[in-house]
Amino acid sequence: MQLGRALDAYLRHVTIERGLSTHTVGAYRRDLEGYVAWLTGEGIDDTSAITPAVVGLFIAERSAAVPAPAATSLARLQSSVRGWHRFLTREGIEQDDPSGRLRPPKAARRLPKALTIDQVERLLAAPSADEPLGIRDRALLELLYATGARVSEAVGLDVDDLAHGDVLRLRGKGSKERIVPIGSYARAAVDAYLTRVRPALAVGGRASARLFLGARGAPLSRQSAWLIIRSAAERAQITAEISPHTLRHSFATHLLQGGADVRVVQELLGHASVATTQIYTHVSVDTLRDIYATSHPRAR
């Protein structure tokens, strides 16, 4: 099959049949468009001409690029290539999978960075309660910490997702829905935003069901939400490393430190496997080690 047609068929499959998020499909598209461009440059225009040697050469060239790609980026690229070729084999478009021998690079395990409870409180208090956008920003930050939502999940919320009192409906990866408690502090902050700020923001833009709106009334983007987090961290004078997932990591870590069961935290985070959640137990163990080393008279 011609490369472009084969790529389009696969992207339709992961979008419609597997229901992957727009963000994930976009990552697959970027990886595979680069792969197809490389294949075309090698004189290959049909999937039947792709051999294990060709796949191996592509990965070898990408691995040797300068600057060197991160192990996670290379692993994602290999996953994209393997997923495409497996699809072509499974659909009977090709008989053999030329990517079958690929082995993803072993990435070093990075423990998620969580803020202390004091740092979280300073972060949440950083937006001004006297300014409309400050009220919105505080509602967003409170909601992220109270629910452990991903930034993409939070900006994808509709007002109707709050219609369940003290719980919230989140749509995670693969359009999977989960219900999580929202907590009184976050609920109060969101209610203040809904009554005092959102109506005025909505007037400035086209009608939108989205909960969080930008200054001109359009739905708040992931990039804008990330800027809100970073700005709040600067105002709170937090020097620790901040990422879009910082409040999500803090949510999970603080729950486990408070005695929550790891499987409960798994459900709240929307992890498909408890193994993904268990990385946070290592963070808690590291904290215990630090406290022990600094507090016990015979620790050293």
Image (cartoon, grey):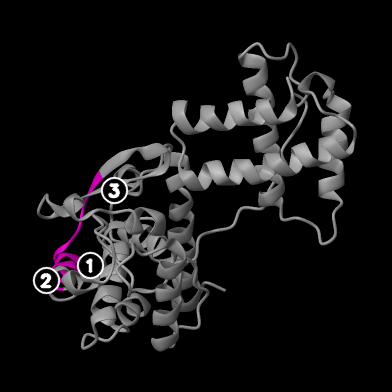
Q: Which region is colored magenta?
A: 179-192
Q: Is residue 191 magenta?
A: yes
Point out the frontmost of discs 3 and 2. Answer: 2
Q: Main secondary structure of the magenta part?
A: helix
Which residue position is annotated with label 2? 195
Residue identified by numbered label 1: 202
Find the distance from the CA under tag 1 to the CA under tag 3.
22 Å
- Residue wearing tag 3: 170
The first of marks 1 and 2 along the sequence is: 2
Q: Is residue 135 left or right of residue 253?
A: left
- Apparent side of residue 46 relative to residue 294 in the rendered image (left or right): right
| Location of residue 142 (image quadrant) | bottom left
Q: Quadrant of the C terminus?
A: bottom right
Q: In the displayed structure, would residue 78 be above or below residue 185? A: above
Of residues 286 and 98, the one nearer the viewer is 98
Q: Is residue 183 magenta?
A: yes
* Residue at (43% x, 37% y) in the render: 273
Coordinates of residue 115 in the picture (x, y in percent)? 42, 72
Q: Nearer the viewer, mark 1 or mark 2?
A: 1
Secondary structure of the residue carrying tag 2 is helix
Amino acid type indicated by mark 1:
Ala
Residue in front for this viewpoint, 114 or 257? 114
